[in-house]
């Protein structure tokens, strides 16, 4: 029995109440990994950085969060 045939056989044994989980998993593993295209807002931020604008941060995440929260309370 091939792996594909085994998968079909097992799929037939999955109760209807759990089939949604199997379908969701299968959709996740059949989507190409490189299919994650950035949205328009992200592309705009990339362009801003490429043109010398925006802000970059290279320190610890904790310090970044503190600085961002500090900016909000000012």
Image (cartoon, rainbow, N blue to C red):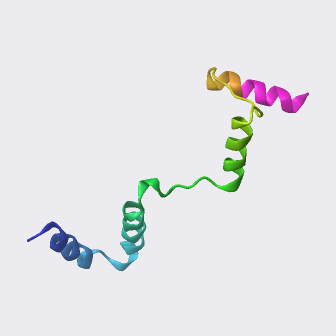
- Is 66 a magenta residue? yes
- At 37% across and 60% down in the image, what residue appears? 29
Q: Residue furthest left?
A: 1
Splitting the image into 4 quarters, where does residue 12 fall?
Answer: bottom left
Q: Which residues are magenta?
A: 65-74
> Who is closer to the viewer here, 10 or 64?
64
Does residue 43 appear to the left or right of 18 in the view shown? right
In the rendering, at what x and y percent does residue 59 appear? Answer: 64, 20
Residue that appears at 67% across and 42% down: 46
For the residue pair 46 and 73, the one nearer the viewer reads as: 46
Q: Is residue 10 left or right of residue 71?
A: left
Quarter holding the N terminus is bottom left
Foreground pick, 21 / 67: 67
Q: Is residue 52 left or right of residue 33?
A: right
Look at the picture and state if 32 lies above or below 51. below
Please tell me which residue is depicted at 11% across the width and 69% down the height of the picture: 2
Question: Height in image: 44 above or below 13?
Answer: above
Occupied quadrant, residue 37: bottom right
How far across and down, in percent of the image, does residue 25 sit?
39, 63
Q: Residue furthest right?
A: 74
Q: Where's residue 55, x and y in %?
A: 74, 30
Task: Give the dominant element type of the magenta stretch: helix, strand or loop.
Answer: helix
x then y, percent, for residue 57: 68, 25
Q: Is residue 10 magenta?
A: no
Tally the numbered discs.
0
Quadrant of the drawing holding the C terminus:
top right
């Amino acid at each position: 029995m091939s792996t594909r045939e085994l998968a079909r056989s097992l799929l037939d044994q999955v109760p209807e109440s759990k089939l949604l989980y199997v379908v969701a998993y299968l959709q996740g593993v059949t989507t190409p990994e490189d299919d994650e295209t950035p949205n328009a807002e992200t592309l705009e931020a990339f362009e801003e950085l490429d043109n010398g604008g925006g802000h970059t941060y290279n320190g610890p995440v904790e310090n970044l969060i503190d600085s961002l929260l500090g900016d909000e309370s000012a």
